[in-house]
Amino acid sequence: MKTVIALLLMTISYFIGNISPATLLARAAGKDIKKEGSGNAGATNVLRVLGAKAAVVTLVIDVAKGFLATALGFFAAHAIAEKMFDPVFTPADSYAMAVSAWCGLAVFIGHVWPLIFKFKGGKGVATALGVLLATDYRIALICLGIFVIIVVATRIVSLGSICAAAIFPFIYIWWLMKRGVITRGVSFALFVYRAMPIILPLIIMAAILVIKHRENIKRIIKGEENKLSFRKEPNNLK
C-alpha cells in the first residue's frame, strides 16, 4: 500500500512536470522552441527567442510546478501515513520526506522528458529549484547563491547551473544531518536504511542536471559557450 500511494503521487507529479510554458508560449508566437536558439525548452532559451516577459513567465511556472509537486507529495503522504500506517513501522515524517523527494524527481523528469510533448523538454534547472524550495528554502537559497555568484563572475548561465547541481548532494546530506535524519558516526547500513530513500532521488536529479548540460560542458571547455550580456540589447545573450 505504501508503495502504491507513493507511485500514484509520483505519477501525478510527473504530469505536473509535463506542463511546459516554454513550449506553449513559443507555439502561441508561431515558433517551435525546440528548433529555435539552443533548442532547450527553458527560461534562458525563451529569453533568447521570445524576450524577457515570456522568460519570466516560463521561469515562474517551471519553479512553481517543482514546488507544487514536491510539497503535494509531502503533505499528502504525511496525512495518509498518520491515518493508515503504524507509526512504529512507518513514521509519518520519514515516509513523507521520502515520498516528497521521489515526487520531486518525478516532476523534474516530467519536465525534462514530458510525455505530452514527445519527451522533448528542458534541462530542468528552474524545476529543480522549485523542488529545493519545497524541500527546504535554505538549501534552495544556498544553491541559488552559488548559481548567481558563478553567473555574475563568468556570465555563463550553464556553468552556474552545473556547479549548483554538483554541490547540491553534499548540501542535502548536511541538511539531513541537521534534521537528525542521519548522524555522524552511524554505520553505513544504518545510513542506507534511514537516508537513502530520501536522498537517492535528489542525487539522481542532480546527476541528470549535469548530464543534460554535457554539450554545454564541452563548449565551456572549448571556450565557445554563450555568455549572458548585462547590457540593454535586443538580444540579451551574445
Image (spheres, rainbow, N blue to C red):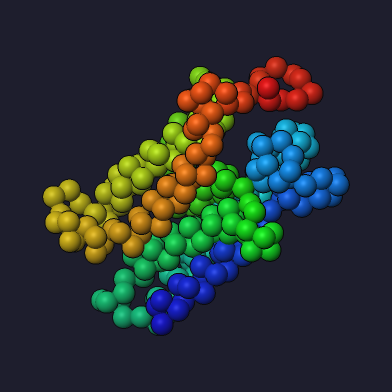
User: Above or below — where is 124 with respect to 100?
Assistant: above
Residue 20 picture location, percent across and down: 69, 53
Q: Furthest residue to the top?
A: 231
Residue 227 picture location, percent across and down: 61, 23
Q: Residue at the location (79% across, 23% down)?
A: 234
User: Above or below — where is 200 with respect to 83?
Assistant: above
**Quadrant housing the N terminus:** bottom left
Residue 72 picture location, percent across and down: 53, 64
User: Above or below — where is 116 with respect to 131?
Assistant: below
Q: Residue at the location (54% across, 34% down)?
A: 216
Q: Residue at the location (44% across, 62% down)?
A: 102
Callout count: 0
Rendering quarter of residue 96: bottom left
- 90 or 5, nearer to the observer: 5
- 222 or 33, nearer to the observer: 222
Residue 25 in view, yes or no = no
